[in-house]
Image: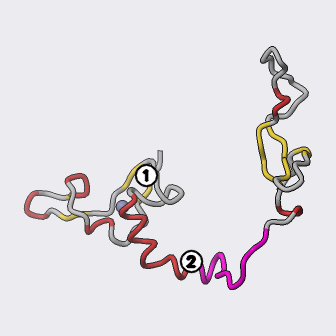
């Protein structure tokens, strides 16, 4: 399994045993490397590292990637579809109904149901 580095620019500044590399007289703290990282969509080794990164870079991410909002967004019937478990996938004896899909979509405004859309 490939190891991933924590993406925080400050990870190596935390002084912990597991960050130390090198021989006794040549020891340095390094960015953590793990097979799995559990914070910030698998990019950071800890909440501290996630917060350090966000503090310095999140303004740029909002401005340049997602786009900063200058007016509110609105929930409408058109964007109110949510993927939910299909309540009919099991019959009343809790047997799986093979013809019923695992998921359906339900409109949170109208409560209407439709098949899962490919989006
Ligand atoms: Zn880290």
Q: Residue at x 81, y 53 (%)?
A: 108
Residue nearest the observer in this picture, 89 or 15: 89
Q: Which residues are magenta?
A: 61-74
For marks 2 and 1 on the same chain, the one whose residue lies earlier in the sequence: 1
Tell me if residue 65 is in the magenta stretch.
Answer: yes
- Quick check: 74 above or below 87? below
Question: Are the residues tagged 2 and 1 within 8 Å (C-beta)?
Answer: no
Q: Nearer the viewer, residue 81 or 96?
A: 81
Q: Residues within 10 Å of mark 2 (few under 14, many from 20)?
A: few
Residue 98: % across, % down = 86, 24
Frontmost residue, 97 versus 69: 69
Number of the front mark, 2 or 1: 2
Side of 87 where 41 appears, left or right: left
User: Is 115 a magenta residue?
Assistant: no
Query: Which residue is label 1 attached to?
Result: 3
Q: Is residue 69 left or right of residue 108?
A: left
Quarter of the displayed picture in which ligand 1 can be seen? bottom left
What color scheme is it? Answer: secondary structure
Question: Which numbered dot is residue 61?
Answer: 2
Q: Position of residue 38 (x, y in %)?
A: 46, 51
Residue lying farthest top?
A: 93
Residue located 79% across and 51% down the image: 82
Q: Quarter of the image holding residue 13?
A: bottom left
Residue at x 13%, y 64% (from the top left corner): 26
Horizontal relation, residue 118 to residue 32: left or right:
right
Residue 4 location in percent, x, y? 44, 56
The numbered dot on residue 67 is none
Where is residue 101 drawn, in percent x and y? Answer: 85, 34
Report helix, strand or loop for mark 2.
helix
Quadrant of residue 48 within the rendered picture:
bottom left
Callout 1: helix, strand or loop?
loop
């Amino acid at each position: 399994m490939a190891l991933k580095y924590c993406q925080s620019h400050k990870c190596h500044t935390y002084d912990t045993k597991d960050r130390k590399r090198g021989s006794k007289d040549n020891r340095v703290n390094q960015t953590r490397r793990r097979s799995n990282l559990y914070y910030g969509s698998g990019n950071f080794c800890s909440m501290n590292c996630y917060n350090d990164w966000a503090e310095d870079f999140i303004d740029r991410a909002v401005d340049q990637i997602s786009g900063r909002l200058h007016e509110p967004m609105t929930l409408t019937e058109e964007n109110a579809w949510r993927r939910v478990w299909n309540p009919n996938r099991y019959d009343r004896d809790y047997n799986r109904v093979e013809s019923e899909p695992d998921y359906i979509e339900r409109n949170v405004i109208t409560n209407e149901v439709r098949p899962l859309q490919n989006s």
